[in-house]
Amino acid sequence: MTAMTALTVLSAEAPSLVQSVDWLAIAPVVITAAVGLVVLVADLFAAERHKPVLGWISVAGLAAATATLLPLRAGDRATFCLTGDPAACSYVADRFTLVIQFLVLAGALVTALVSVTAVRDTRMPAGEYWFLLLSSAAGAALLPASRDLATLIVALEVASLPAFALVGMRRGDRLSSEAALKFFLSSVTATAVSLMGVSFVYAATGSLHLTQVADRLEDVPGQLDTLAMAGVALTLVGFAFKTAAVPFHFWVPDTYVGAPLPIAGYLSVVGKAVGFTGLILVTVIAFPAYSDIWGPALAVLAALTMTLGNAAALRQSPDRPNSAVRLLAWSSVGQAGYLLVPIAAAAYSGREQIGSTVAYALMYAAVNLGAFAVAALVARTKPLHRISDYRGLYAERPLAALSLGFFLLCLAGLPPGIIGLFAKVTVFRSAVDAGLGWLAVVMAINVVIALYYYLRWTALLFRTPEGAQTRTRAPWPVAAAVIVTAITAVVLSGAPEIILRVTSGSLFAQ
């Protein structure tokens, strides 16, 4: 046999080391990242008067990335798989991935609409702003598809690092600089803790792929059990920082106040989705063998988070500057507690409970982004962001007042905001089904507490205004963001089964 023939035979018998790439599966991430690069390069050559076009390019790119989810709706694609184990893939486009990617990209699209006017009015550097927003959105879209710990951490940082700069984008603003620094330090700490946890898990299992980690944690040698438990705990602590769970929530109120309003809304929805997505993936897919550890821990975190968040929101003074943003910030901490409940329940009654968290996240995304869009509209004439600034808003902007009132009722879980009630009942049921009756009681008490500050703000919208009203024309991109989120909330309140149909059953590829 000649050398050439032997080489041919060996090549035919050996498995290929070249991975095929499913470009359609990764299209939402690739398009978002590519448009970000296009905007950054175009900013170098565009004249100052043409800089607003960069915003519309970003909006179009996010819309195109969202549209590419349609051909993926079957949820049966995966790529970057191991040649020796085709079931271990780094990128999986299952139903869970597609739903979270839709939440992230649609949330970024609404943020971009609100930002078009904000970037122009505050004279923020357009090229940098849009590049950072698109980069963060690309990382957030990559994260739910990540099925190995390395890709998960990289996606988490790609989503987080641009957000630091976006928070501090208002140059010369002391609050903005302080917020960016606090956000940066807390996130870096969280990443360091997560990386240490991941390294411990890798040392104990010898793999980074979530499915392989799950299999090997079922039978960890006795001498490595402590190391594995420490790795699981540290990884969960790192993601708890990202979700703003108590006691890792301290960065939230100051960050939201210092950030531009569109970015505060982005962090409250997309940033939170990033943290919860990572937490879901590592708990129910990678660490089910240690559910007896992370289940009770997350249940306690859920109770503490919703209680402290709602108690702090209750204490906000209407006349204090930035009280409206602070209330929304503390409210988002309380909502994070509700989102944690089904994840904790999954430790007791199976991963199907995760659908409740996804359903709640979809509802929360629509109404919270809408609330921030209305806040951005009001801030054009009342820049102090006080709750008292909303008194008599109905007399000045009837549609904005009605929309904000509806968003607040959805967050409170009161009719006609049926989607908010539906989401809370879904989460409540997951706690009961898992045998976490005490957590369901804590949640019920917190829902009642939250009614007060949501209804107090809602009632203020329709009171008699004080002094003369300043009527200005609403910028149409901001108005479009309010209208889109309001229509979405109304439609879902009329047909909440839409979300149930999307989130029920198995969300993960088997």
Image: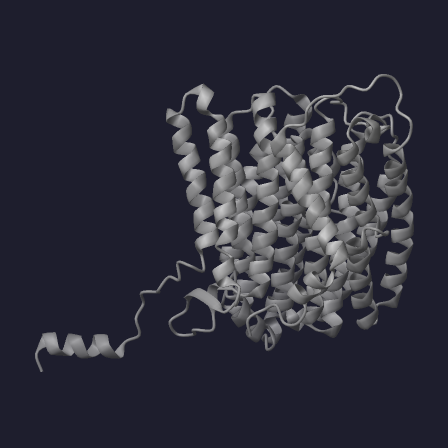
Report the front residue among 256 and 406.
406
Give the left or right position of residue 428, taking residue 264 as reference.
right
Q: Within the image, what quadrant is residue 389 found in? A: top right
What is the residue that sits farthest to the left in this orientation?
A: 2
> Is 440 positioned to the left or the right of 345 in the image?
right
The number of numbered discs placed on residues in the rendered structure image is 0
Residue at point 39%, 32% (across, down): 41
Counting from the top left corner in percent of width and height, residue 178 is at 67, 28
Residue at the far top: name it: 468
Q: Position of residue 456 (x, y in %)?
A: 90, 38
Q: Residue at x 43, y 34 (%)?
A: 39
Pick the quarter of the image with the N terminus. Answer: bottom left
Q: How is the image coloured?
A: one colour
Q: Position of residue 302 (x, y in %)?
A: 79, 56
Residue 114 in the image: x percent, y percent?
62, 34
Residue 482: image quadrant is top right
Name the side, left or right, on which 226 lies relative to 47.
right
**Quadrant occupied by the C terminus:** bottom right
Is 103 or 73 nearer to us in this picture? 73
Which residue is depicted at the point 58% across and 69% down?
A: 508
The answer, for residue 488, to whether it is visible in the render is yes
Q: Left or right: 431 with respect to 68?
A: right
> Image point 61% across, 45% down: which residue?
107
Is residue 120 positioned above or below 368 on the image? above
Using the rendered image of the protein, determine whether residue 364 is visible from the camera's viewpoint: no
